[in-house]
Amino acid sequence: MSRSLNKVMLIGNLGNDPEVRSTTGGNRVATFSLATSRTWNDAGGSKQEKTEWHRCVVWNSKTSTLADIVEKYVKKGDKLYVEGRVEYRQWQDKDGQTRYSTEINVRELIMLGGSKGGGDYDAAESSNRSRAAVGAAKAKATAGGGEDFEDFPNALADEDDDLPF
């Protein structure tokens, strides 16, 4: 039996605010365009840039309310990491012409960019969550006999990391 993989990972910026609709069955779906860019120097040494636009579709499911999260927190210009699969569709329009569409069916989404992005980002709420996570980690480490986080008091609370994105 042969195996196959259809997986897409993109980091880009939203071109417009997401559009959120409800289907006739009551399911919610969000759509947005994500721009990815690449730059290079051509043979003459001139800097070139190309932007690709990706149509992304996010559905609510039995286990996820991702479309609702997109509606509430994601806005034009936000930087996102999306992961999903490529889907190709074709249909007949009202004039009988065959139309084609390429979409990214998003399964995971991470809002990037810290406190600048993410729409209604609540820094105080995030800070409270960070403190709670540090407290839980300390309690777990102490109960489990693991490392003592008192040696590195700010290790878990430090939001400034050196990740490349």
Image (cartoon, rainbow, N blue to C red):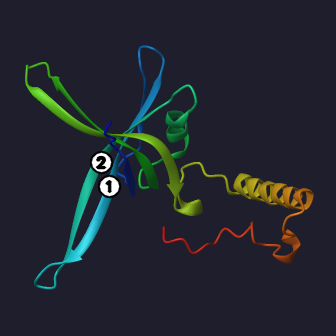
Q: Quadrant of the N terminus?
A: top left
Relative horizontal placement of residue 133, taking residue 76 as reference (left or right): right
Q: In this view, does 32 lie above or below 151?
A: above
Q: Residue 35 carries which label?
A: 1
Relative horizontal placement of residue 122, taking residue 93 as reference (left or right): right
Mark 1 surroundings within 10 Å by alpha-carbon count, few (fewer than 14), some (14 through 19), many (20 or more): some
Q: Residue furthest top?
A: 25
Q: Is residue 155 above or below residue 130?
A: below
Q: Label 1 to label 2, Cα distance in Å?
A: 6 Å
Q: Which amino acid does label 1 sit on?
A: Ala
Which is nearer the eye, 45 or 115?
45
Residue located beneath label 2 in the image: 54
Q: Are marks 1 and 2 in contact (CB under 8 Å)?
A: yes
Mark 2 surroundings within 10 Å by alpha-carbon count, few (fewer than 14), some (14 through 19), many (20 or more): some
How far across and how far down the image is residue 124, in percent? 73, 56
Q: Which residue is drawn at 80% across and 60% down?
A: 134
How far across and how far down the image is residue 80, in percent? 45, 54
Which is nearer the eye, 99 or 6?
6
Q: Which residue is drawn at 32% across and 55% down?
A: 35
Tell me the SS state at disc 1: strand
Numbered circles on residues, count: 2
Tell me the SS state at disc 2: strand
Q: Residue at x 59, y 61 (%)?
A: 115
Q: Which of marks 1 and 2 is nearer the N terminus?
A: 1
Q: Residue furthest front?
A: 1
Quarter-of-image position of residue 97: top left
Which is nearer the eye, 151 or 110?
151
Q: In this view, does 161 lie above or below 105?
A: below
How far across and how far down the image is residue 58, in percent? 43, 36
Relative horizontal placement of residue 118, taking residue 105 as reference (left or right): right
Relative horizontal placement of residue 90, taking residue 68 as reference (left or right): left
Quarter-of-image position of residue 92: top left
